């Protein structure tokens, strides 16, 4: 395959109201993300195929194929109502991988699974194995059935297949299903779980079919009028059906649903040049960042409803921070970045990728976190299978997160850079290449361990154009070619570039202490350690003989450490001066005292604290961990 095949998860149409457009092709080659992509390809995706098969999801398609052909529904469906989406997300990952490098095993696996999908589709284009096999009336329980949620994932997988490899197999299935939806759905039908909006928008972009975009726009417009039947204790906000998207000032309810809806609504806004809708989404995004986002970029502070909490309700230990919500956040921020060109969107994307997303998968690529809390106490509850105190799991009964990580890692190349009429913008730093029309750039860097990024122009048109490099908000000081660069913005250099020209970006990576605004009460008096885009944590494995809960930071001095036992050699730990903080007189009874004479903490001695990247925690067994630690200079 030619290196120049256009490959992008999101591809706005020519008339779309976007500031930036995807480049022809980004390629990560080696480095931090290259290593993760290699594990994804060699370990996670093959293992994912086995787990999806073991869960019964391929079997459901096989049964539906028989039932659909013979019109005799009623065979036993295995797994959740959204089991089909696991197949589709996994297929999407395989497709993007095939686009990165074709491989017989991947091609065979893709073909076999795609043929099952083709066979399972009903003659009129409908496809949802749970409905087909249970005989439930189609669209009769859209609040819970996930029929359109699965359709959306099918559409995204289909578009990936086409863009990555030119394979039309799934695109035909997705198009027939979408045609059916356009005709068959009652005007006020809404899926309880947004997702189909993004799928329809991308199908429109890929095929030019306007009715697909119109249907997505209708879903966005109809939502928020409390039309979805309520289930259980949840109010309409849980399914984002309380306030219309264009009136909402914040994100609420189930966090994954909220992110998928916002991302799909952004697609609709830019494709229809609906600037009011876009302004509403910008407002919601800003409120989310200001009041509902964890330091890691994680989203969702409530286990109940897997949902956002109120403003500044960001307890680290009970955080839900579902891996899928972080992925949805990356999808939304990327779309907002394309729409506006503003660096803040890329900043959040990067924070979320390196921390809240990456924590969802083990270094070996074979174990997963569903919930990504920022603190696990000694003796934390392990009852729920998702409890971080149990450590990462092989798979989950609700397996939405693992294949979501797979498809994101296999398409990560698409998020490196963009282009506009004036030039090329670099957003994420990884070694590799960026092809944008007649421009070819090569990037060399050890990021995020070092802050030095070298960009070499390999091909360029013979006219002036602008190379823009994102300077993350934390990068202070930062420089480009020895001149100061402003953090939180794009550093722009306009000239007629020649092959061989080189730009050196220095992002001044060094460890730093971070505190939260006082209103974030759960973090008052505490600090976190960050280094470049990485959030760090204290993990039990590095502090034998003491409990992480008792550690506090004693001073502002931080230093890079050397390799940590049990973690890859390139991982840079951060060393801090600390103390072990105990109350010797505390008898283990009722833990409260009069405020008039609070017990003075006693320091059981100095301690050297070793902070490790949050994404890497729980790779040496599960145990206590914390991102925030008390700051006690005395
Ligand atoms: O409902 C489908 C997926 O299952 C959601 O996105 C996740 O939160 C999990 O509940
Ligand atoms: Zn999930």
Image (spheres, rainbow, N blue to C red):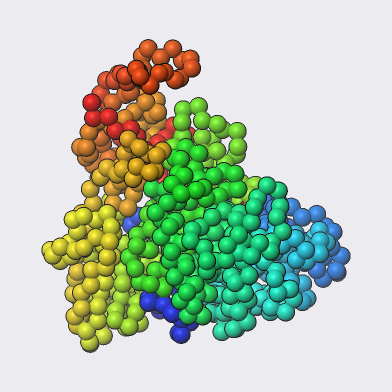
Query: Residue at 22% of width from left, 84% of height from top?
Result: 464
Residue in front for this viewpoint, 226 or 510 = 226
Is residue 197 left or right of 513 when viewed as pictured?
right
Residue 226 visible somewhere in the drawing: yes
Q: Nearer the viewer, residue 157 or 102?
A: 157
Q: Is residue 368 visible?
A: no
| Extreme residue toward the left, this view | 482
Residue 405, placed above or below residue 529: below
- Decide if residue 138 is on the left or right side of residue 394: right
Residue at 65% x, 74% y: name it: 174
Q: Residue at x 47, y 66 (%)?
A: 281
| 19 lies above or below 599 | below
Image quarter in which the C terminus is found: top left
Closer-to-camera residue (382/556): 556
User: Which quarter of the figure has residue 610?
Assistant: top left
Q: Position of residue 304 (x, y in %)?
A: 59, 44
Q: Position of residue 7 (x, y in %)?
A: 45, 74
Q: How many marks?
A: 0
Q: Which residue is farthest front? A: 596
- Residue 245's quadrant in the figure? bottom right
User: Residue sitting at 52 percent across and 69 percent down?
Assistant: 246
Where residue 436 appears, x then y in whole percent? 35, 78
Residue 351 relative to residue 318: left or right = left
Image spot of residue 257 (x, y percent):
57, 58
């Amino acid at each position: 395959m030619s290196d120049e095949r256009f490959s992008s998860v999101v591809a706005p149409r020519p008339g779309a109201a976007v500031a930036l457009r995807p480049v022809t092709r980004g390629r990560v080659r080696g480095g931090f993300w290259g290593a993760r992509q290699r594990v994804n390809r060699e370990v996670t995706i093959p293992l994912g195929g086995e787990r999806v098969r073991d869960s019964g999801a391929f079997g459901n398609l096989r049964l539906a194929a028989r039932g659909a052909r013979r019109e005799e529904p009623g065979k036993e469906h295995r797994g959740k109502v959204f089991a089909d989406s696991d197949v589709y997300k996994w297929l999407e990952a395989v497709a993007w991988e095939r686009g990165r490098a074709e491989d017989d095993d991947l091609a065979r696996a893709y073909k076999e699974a795609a043929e099952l999908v083709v066979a399972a589709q009903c003659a009129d284009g409908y496809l949802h194995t749970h409905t087909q096999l249970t005989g439930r009336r189609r669209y009769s329980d859209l609040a819970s059935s996930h029929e359109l949620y699965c359709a959306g994932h099918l559409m995204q997988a289909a578009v990936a297949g086409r863009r990555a490899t030119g394979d039309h197999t799934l695109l035909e299935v997705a198009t027939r299903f979408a045609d059916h939806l356009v005709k068959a759905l009652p005007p006020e039908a809404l899926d309880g779980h947004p997702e189909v909006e993004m799928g329809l928008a991308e199908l429109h972009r890929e095929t030019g079919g306007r009715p697909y975009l119109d249907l997505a726009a209708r879903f966005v417009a109809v939502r928020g009028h409390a039309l979805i039947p309520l289930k259980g204790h949840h109010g309409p906000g849980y399914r984002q059906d309380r306030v219309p998207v264009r009136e909402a000032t914040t994100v609420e309810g189930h966090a994954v649903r909220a992110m998928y809806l916002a991302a799909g609504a952004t697609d609709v806004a830019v494709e229809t040049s609906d600037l009011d809708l876009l302004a509403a989404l910008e407002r919601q995004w800003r409120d989310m960042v200001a009041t509902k986002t964890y330091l890691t970029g994680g989203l969702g502070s409530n286990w109940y409803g897997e949902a956002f909490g109120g403003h500044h309700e960001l307890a680290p230990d009970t955080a839900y921070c579902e891996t899928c919500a972080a992925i949805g956040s990356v999808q939304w921020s990327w779309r907002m970045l394309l729409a506006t060109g503003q660096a803040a969107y890329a900043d959040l994307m990067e924070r979320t990728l390196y921390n809240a997303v990456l924590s969802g998968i083990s270094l070996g690529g074979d174990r997963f976190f569903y919930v990504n809390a920022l603190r696990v106490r000694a003796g934390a509850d392990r009852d729920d299978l998702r409890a971080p105190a149990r450590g990462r799991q092989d798979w989950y009964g609700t397996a939405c997160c693992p294949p979501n990580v797979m498809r994101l890692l296999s398409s990560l190349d698409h998020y490196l850079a963009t282009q506009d009429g004036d030039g090329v913008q670099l957003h994420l730093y990884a070694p590799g290449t960026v092809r944008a029309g007649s421009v070819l750039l090569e990037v060399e860097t050890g990021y995020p361990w070092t802050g030095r990024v070298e960009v070499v122009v390999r091909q360029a048109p013979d006219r002036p154009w602008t190379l823009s490099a994102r300077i993350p908000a934390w990068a202070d000081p930062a420089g480009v070619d020895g001149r100061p660069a402003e953090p939180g913005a794009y550093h722009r250099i306009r000239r007629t570039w020649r092959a061989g020209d080189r730009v050196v970006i220095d992002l001044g990576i060094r460890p730093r202490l971070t505190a939260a605004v006082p209103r974030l009460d759960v973090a008052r008096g505490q600090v976190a350690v960050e280094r470049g885009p990485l959030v760090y944590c204290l993990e039990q494995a590095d502090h034998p003989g003491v409990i992480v809960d008792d550690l506090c930071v004693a001073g502002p001095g931080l230093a890079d450490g050397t390799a940590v036992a049990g973690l890859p050699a390139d991982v840079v730990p951060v060393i801090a001066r600390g103390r072990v903080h105990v109350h010797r007189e505390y008898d283990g009874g009722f833990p409260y005292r009069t405020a008039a004479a609070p017990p003075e903490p006693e320091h059981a001695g100095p301690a050297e604290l070793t902070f490790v990247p949050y994404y890497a925690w729980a790779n040496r067994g599960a145990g206590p961990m914390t991102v925030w630690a008390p700051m006690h200079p005395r």
